[in-house]
Amino acid sequence: FRSFSPTKAPSSAPHTPSPTKTPTPAPITPSPTQPPVVPPTKSPTPPEGCYSNNYKDCLVNDYIGHEKSCNMIWLQNGPPQDTCTALWGECTADMSSCCEPAVCHGDANFASCVPPT
């Protein structure tokens, strides 16, 4: 017959690992936004021509063909965009200030913009 010796009781409870934290979800990255859409710009419209009797200002349509507009010219690009001197205006201080095709005619005492000869 065999004798069994009593087993020793464990000195401490068996080691179990500590519980781990539940994983946290990854941060949500916002989806990329589309760059702003810039509306296309309109092409510059070419200036419209007009009739003039002073080489600077356009005549109103009702005046074209009027007996006083017999010296009118066609301004192909419309009125000048600069500050030129109109036909018959004084150009004494600046001999190159006349609206084309007018020319400055006169001397140092007085000159005016006249039609080209």
Image (cartoon, rainbow, N blue to C red):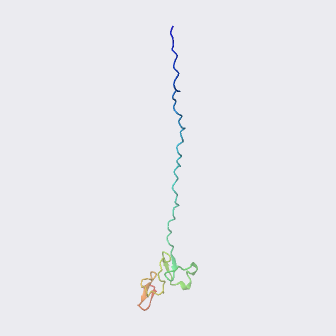
Residue 108 appears left or right of 65:
left
Q: Is residue 3 above or below residue 79?
A: above
Residue at figure coordinates x 49%, y 78% from the top left: 74
- State the image coordinates of residue 61 (x, y, percent, origin top left): 57, 78
Estimate the x, y position of residue 53 in percent, counting from the top left: 51, 83
Extreme residue in the left direction: 108
The front one of 115 and 87 is: 87
| Vertical comparison of 42 with 2: above or below | below
Q: Residue furthest top?
A: 1
- Left or right: residue 23 compared with residue 108: right
Q: Nearer the viewer, residue 89 or 5?
A: 5
Numbered marks: total: 0
Q: Residue furthest bottom?
A: 109
Q: Is 18 on the left or on the right of 95, as rendered?
A: right
Return the residue nearer the eye: 102 or 83. Answer: 83
Seen at 52% across and 77% down, the residue is: 50
Outermost residue to the right: 62
x and y, in percent, of residue 35 in the image: 51, 55
Residue 31 lies, in percent from the top left, at 53, 49
Q: Quadrant of the C terminus?
A: bottom left
